Amino acid sequence: MKSVSNPAANDPGAWDAVFVQSRRELIGILLIWLLFAGWVLGAAYLLAYADPDRPVTLVLGMPAWVFWAVAMPWLGANLVIIAFCMLGMKDQSLDDENEPTLEGDVANLS
Amino acid sequence: MDTNVIHLVPSAAGATNAALFTFAVYMLFVFFLAWLSSRVRSKKEFVSEYFLGSRGLGVWAFALTFAATNSSGGSFMGFPALIYTHGWVLALWIASYMVVPIVTTGLMAKRLNQVARRAGALTVPEILRERFGSPGVGLIATGLLTFFMFFYLLAQFKAGSNILATLLGEIEVFQTAVAWVAQWQHGVPLLGNAEPDYLLCLIVFSGTVIAYTAYGGFRAVVWTDVMQGFVMVIGVVLMFVLMMKQTGGLGAATRAVAEMTPPEHGEVDLRLAAVSDSDVILRKGAWLEVRDAGGSRVTVVRTKGLTRIPAGEVQAVGVPVLIVTTPDEIAKIEANPLLVDTVVTITSRQAYLSGAGKKGAYVSVPGPKVDSDVGFLSIGMALSFFVFWSFGGAGQPSNMVRQMAFKDAPTLRRSIMMVSVYYSLIYFPLVIIFCCARVVVPGMEIEPDRVMPETARVLATAAGTPWLAGLIVAAPFAAVMSSVDSFLLMVSSGLVRDVYQRNINPSVSENRMKWLTYGVTGCVGVAATLAVLNPPQYLQNLIVFSTGGLAGCFLVPMALTLFWSRMTRAGVIAGMLGGCGTHVLLYIAGYLAHGRFAVFAFLGLEAFIWDMVGAAIFSVGFSLTSRPLPAALVQRFFGREAGR
């Protein structure tokens, strides 16, 4: 019986292309989140929570655990996000793309 | 009045008029942008333009309106206060902001924008209504959104007024205006009990925001957000540079902070050497020296409030103070010279439950805390916040409505990159600045929320450029304004578009919609203002309640609406109500457990996580057990040729 909730039941190519790509991007974004959640919380646990009384050393002027568990992943997250935006996200038509932009509106005022 | 009193210590250094001047310029610019946006709007169809800027946001507008709306007053007042009070552990508390831009903006934005276009939707409830072909779904969404958002508006109106009062507090012109308001409000119903400085700031703040939001609509909100976004980042960068210069670099400052031990809260008795025939006044924030019998300095304390010793008396007992415990600070802090010989005696002291007497408490985990023996941030709470900041933001309808408004897919990609860099320039530097602030402005535990303007004043004065303080302190005001205007517009669009136009009078004329929209935006703003004239208790808890509630109601149901074709009307209604119900139940449990308005952290996790679980179970369960949607409706939003 044909499912009314699945346009691709009889034709695998029937899904909307933006929907399919958005779903891929969603999975990619969740993986990025997991990667950095693991890095931040794992490093914080190992370098700080496992032994809170260990002497604090500094790296670039900040506590070493902050450097490895927050500063470095923050830098890494920026690089990964930029790479994902440039390589992992596709430019697709979302319909009605020819409407004027705010920047254009400002230019038109002058 | 002051002719009959003696001030025990000299007055504090007065604030310059820089903050007032900056504020005035800032306000003028806000109204200029509202006027400019109304000129653009006059050439376009009213409703689409007013509520969604005709879906024309480019990279700068989309990126900065998103960034500014998400940075509320808390980012520039509450967050610095937490950093100052608990130290470097706040870097971990806020660490999720490294992925907030991509999670909050990228998770659903492209699909949400596409579905909104296909549905012709201008609001979040309208998307749900069209996706499921059910006015009932739209109305329930509008009801939940209006309910939670109104609480949030109340909290932000109060926060905006408090920030303004803090920024202008010591300026002479402002104090004159406050005295005038105090005379005027006397005997006026509703106003009689409000603090005059708060009342004045509330009127100025709410009047401004209501006026430019109602007049300018979404485009004015976005343009002011862009300006506010620039003000915020410029303020932070300036503070960072001045702080590094003042402290001799980050390494020197962190080493100094590592030597600090948390202060104690306590009380002192003040005893004058002789009876005075005038009242003796001791101002809030005065530094006093405590000496032993031999005259050697034991410690220094800072007064938490104004103290008055009436004429004819020689002492004040039980004066609340902050007691410094770090030897280096005790030696370095200059006590205020006493104009009348006075003996200061500590009579009680309360140490922090976590971190007391521990060197390094401010540079290690879990961070010192005055009222908890487990410290500020356990690893479990760090996980909770890593989830909450990212996904809680993704579930905010104010973010969703922006995701409906960007122009095209390249705009989305570039905006995510821009916001990532923008947040990196704001949040991590804030942690560095206010950890270092412990070195340059000691004793701010007496009023942590003032640490931002006070640090700005000290840094700018030390740099010989006091006018810079005005620019820096405009940042928190910009942050709260950019949040309030967005939420105000969300509530009014829900009532005018979703309730009136879609359900009561679909054939309403454009002119009538226009005036109705102006009127409703104004009325909602005025109602929120009246509601916070005498603000309710637990306001900070209300913020957490409303933002968590919004995300609990909307994140999972909206994600399934966009990405799961089997989602049904029953599923989305059950998901929204299930998320809401879980949220409310955890607050009821919290009230029963704590005896006050607080959330119950089941298994030590944030309520939001359980809200998401509840919403997911209800959404999926009810969808699988209810009749699927008609094929045409599914095809419209999931099929290849849909919508064309």
Image: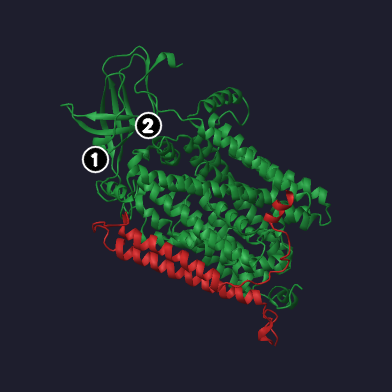
Give me the residue at 58% from left, 42% from top.
B157
What hue represents chain B?
Answer: green
Quarter of the image for residue B465 reads top left
Residue at the outermost top position: B277
Q: Is residue B272 above or below residue B52?
A: above
Q: Is residue B256 visible?
A: yes
**Protein image colouring:** by chain
Marks 1 and 2, Cα distance to the nearest angstrom?
Answer: 20 Å
Earlier along the polypeptide chain: callout 1 or callout 2? 2
Q: Which chain is red?
A: A
Q: Residues within 10 Å of mark 1 (few under 14, many from 20)?
A: few
Give percent across and percent down for residue B307: 37, 25
Q: Are marks 1 and 2 on the same chain?
A: yes
Q: Is residue B555 left or right of residue B88?
A: right
Determine which of the numbered discs, if any, sits on residue B541 in the image: none
Q: Which residue is mark 2?
A: B285
Q: Are marks 1 and 2 in contact (CB under 8 Å)?
A: no
Q: Is residue B375 above or below residue A16?
A: above
Q: Is residue B444 left or right of residue B140?
A: left
Give amino acid for label 1.
Asp
Q: Quadrant of the C terminus of chain B?
A: bottom right
Q: Is residue A67 above or below residue A38?
A: above
Secondary-structure class at tag 2: loop
Q: Which residue is mark 1?
A: B328
- Looking at the rendered image, the disc whose residue lies closer to the viewer, 1 or 2, is 1
Q: Is residue B581 visible?
A: no
Give amino acid for label 2.
Gly
